[in-house]
Amino acid sequence: MHRVLISDPLSEDGIKPLLEAADTEVIQKPSMEKEELLEEVAKADALIVRSQTQVTKEVLEHGVNLKIVGRAGVGVDNIDLDAATDNGVVVVNAPDGNTISTAEHTMAMLMSMARNIPQAYHSLQQGNWDRKKYVGVELKNKTLGVVGFGRIGRVVTRRAKGHRMNVIAYDPFLTREKAEKAGVEHGTLDEVLALADFITVHTPLIAATHHLINKDAFAKMKNGARILNCARGGIIEEEALYEALQSGKIAGAALDVFEEEPAINNKLLELPQVVSVPHLGASTVEAQENVAVDVSNDVMEVLRGGNAKQPVNIPSIPEEMQDKLTPYITLSEKLGAFLGSIVRGGLNNINVYYSGELTDVDPTPLTRKVVKSVLQLFVGNRVNDVNSYKIAKDKGIEINEQKTTSTKGFTNLLTVELETDEETRSIAGTLLNGLGARVVRLDGYSVDVIPEGHLISIHHKDQPGAIGRVGSLLAEHDVNIATMQVGRTDIGGAAIMILTIDKEVGPECQEHLAHVEDINRVQYLKL
Ligand SMILES: NC(=O)c1ccc[n+]([C@@H]2O[C@H](COP(=O)([O-])OP(=O)(O)OC[C@H]3O[C@@H](n4cnc5c(N)ncnc54)[C@H](O)[C@@H]3O)[C@@H](O)[C@H]2O)c1
Ligand SMILES: O=C(O)CC[C@@H](O)C(=O)O
């Protein structure tokens, strides 16, 4: 039974997949104090949050059984991603579910600010009929500057063009060609700041965007420009905004988000030219249901052993590649486990080579499976797909991935090479149509082995009787041989045999085998 803790308010309809799943127990506890959150997360297999819960390093370290943190929304700045990765916890978000709601909210805030609607409403509520005081401005023919031209920035642009606004956009990943296709003017940040009558930010809150709109930025803006933040508090430096509003440089601001939330006693809220609401961009029935459904499905997929569809802290397998790559996942894991079981010495390099049809895909997800399988044998089961690369890096283990043309006659070939401070060993495997994974080379010898169950790898001298002696000794230990593969480089020279056997071979039997004439090296492994 998977235990799923939900620590922020989510749409009941949206989490129905979780509530109705036979293998999940859902604990909904919004607005927990820190101590209770730490207690509850220690019992949880999954944690689902919105933007209120701070998923800190401490929370993640208390989540000793946590496999996944689901963010029912876009921004993950309330989650310590590095700590999640270090603790082998995958973080997923729901990047599409609230795009429309937030874009519509941005337009609502834009028009409220342009026409002083909240201020006029409050004035009328106080019994004033003051029409001159709240004269606003039109949007038509005005220039909207969009900083951050992603999902929400693009929808805001379409809505603004519907109001006959001119749009100029800045985004480090926006090319002139893409801007032209989207029907917007491409600008640098400075150009957007200089030309826009209204500026709206739609970037994530990351180091590069923290205080992106600061005192210098305000100085570059048109006198009387207006600014919106329906993305994240902190993108606009609030102290600088306050000064720009007080000086009259900036005519107005519409704020959905704040550097510190809840934004109680924030001095910006005292200014008459500021329109503000408590982080409502995604607060619609539709958005909350969308993000809850998306994140619930991803959480259940991962808890049931599947791959995350919207991972934030590991590369995702593109939907269109999942069918092609999934069959190779088992092969990758088996090859890594096989070679990792028999290699000696301290691990320095994990090299993975792809050839044949595997050169047509991005094989990184497969390399990640190899690395996890190898490291688990050196570090233990706390290694998983999420933290394997970080653990390898921390241990100074280099990971190399390469596509080669040498398929050795196979339609697909995956080769794993482990370099240690004592030796370099390699294994290659393929997928045979309908027959599954096969090991076809070990240390350069040609073999044909199904990598599963109990196996013995033996390096020996190619001499008459060597194989018989191994068989006889195993018989003495009541070990039955299921299959035997023998490979050699030349007659009378070095050779290898790989046996699949019916049960585990204990240390005593391995010791006896290692002392058989012409036997150089014996290794038992279980896959
Ligand atoms: N107010 C709300 O309730 C609410 C709701 C949803 C999203 N958001 C916030 O809005 C942000 C944007 O959401 P989205 O779905 O459009 O995300 P997105 O990832 O689709 O788009 C973000 C864009 O920002 C761009 N960007 C990154 N760094 C930049 C920089 N230095 N300068 C300019 N652009 C930069 C990226 O290239 C990307 O195109 C989210 O990260 C989230 O924090 C807020
Ligand atoms: O959960 C919310 O209401 C806010 C979510 C929003 O800020 C987001 O980043 O998706």
Image: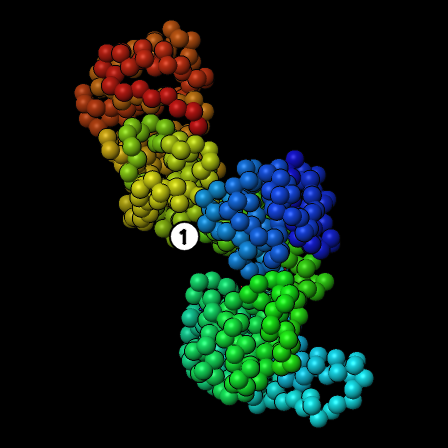
In the image, residue 321 above or below residue 348: below
Q: Position of residue 297 (x, y in %)?
A: 63, 49
Seen from the viewer's position, the closer of residues 12 and 23 is 12
Identify the image quadrant of the N terminus.
top right
Q: Quadrant for residue 97, please give it.
A: bottom right
In the image, residue 52 above or below residue 394: below
Q: Quadrant for residue 139, please give it.
A: bottom right
Q: Let me know if residue 486 appears in the view.
A: yes
Q: Residues within 10 Å of mark 1 (few under 14, many from 20)?
A: few
In the image, residue 109 above or below residue 292: below
Q: Position of residue 390 (x, y in %)?
A: 40, 45
Could you tell me which residue is drawn at 47 percent across and 62 percent down?
A: 206
Residue picked out by circle 1: 361
Seen from the viewer's position, the closer of residues 481 and 341 is 341
Residue that sits furthest to the top in the current view: 476
Q: Name the colouring of the figure.
A: rainbow
Q: Label 1 amino acid?
A: Val
Q: Let me know if residue 4 appears in the view.
A: no
Could you tell me which residue is drawn at 63 percent across and 67 percent down?
A: 265
